[in-house]
Amino acid sequence: SLTAGDLFKGDCEGNEYQFMINNSLLNAAISKYYDVVFFLNLSQPTDLPSKNSSCNIMPVDTVCVAMYGGAGTIGKCGILKSEAATNQAVCSIVVNHRVVPEYLLFQLLALRKFWMKYAVGTRKDPNISQDTVGKMRVIAPNVEEQREIANYLIAFCEKTNLQISSREQLISKLTEYKKSLIYECVTGKKEIV
């Protein structure tokens, strides 16, 4: 077993990058794995002069974890699918050769429910720190097994998401039908037999 801190590579710098904040983890194009972002495809690039910014430019496949925002936000995670700048509200994990990013993401999702236990702060919404994320214990089997587990979970989640989407569409259609039936019945456009 490793800690997430054992998997960090370091920071990148540059400018003309997309910018990601905590809200990006909530509002980006998402897959519904535990109400969490999976692949982050962020909006337009932003010119961020690295010398004037405390932001870091993170590479593709960086695993990002929301650290601020209380129980509704802490621990939401995603994987960058383009280089992006992150700020202090996001813990960005650039994994080394021992860890598959998608596998780490699923590990972090499994641990999310425990993170509020480590949240601190005097604000209404306490936060976790990079130190908390870095000390989180993760199971790291060999890379091939990690890929196999991640691929299985991705396929399962995609299949499940399709089923959920199909049912949501059916619910939406039934809701509209119910509204129109009520309207037709109360306005006399449909006779009740």
Image (spheres, helix red, strand yellow):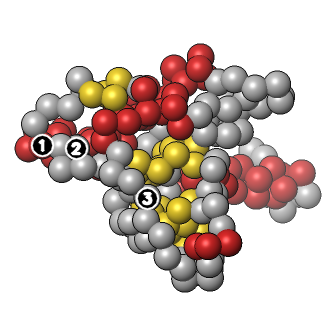
Q: Which residue lies under the disc numbered 3?
A: 11
Q: Residue at x 36, y 66 (%)?
A: 60
User: Counting residues from the N terminus, which is met first, the one under dot 3 or under dot 2?
Assistant: 3
- Residue 138, image quadrant: top left
Q: In the rendering, at what x and y percent does residue 112 appear?
A: 49, 29
The residue furthest front is: 51
Is residue 147 in view?
yes
User: In this rendering, would 13 be left or right of 118?
Assistant: left
Q: Which residue lies under the disc numbered 2?
A: 99
Q: Residue at x 62, y 56 (%)?
A: 87
Q: Which residue lies under the disc numbered 1?
A: 143
Q: Identify residue type, mark 3.
A: Asp
Q: In the rendering, at what x and y percent does residue 149 appear?
A: 18, 39
Q: Residue at x 34, y 29 (%)?
A: 3
**Label 3: element kind:** loop
**Label 2: element kind:** loop
Looking at the image, residue 171 lies above or below residue 106 = below
Question: Crowding near pointer 1: few (<14 within 10 Å), some, many (20+)?
Answer: some
Q: Identify residue type, mark 1.
A: Val
User: Counting residues from the N terminus, which is met first, the one under dot 1 or under dot 3?
Assistant: 3
Dots 3, 2 in contact, CB < 8 A: no
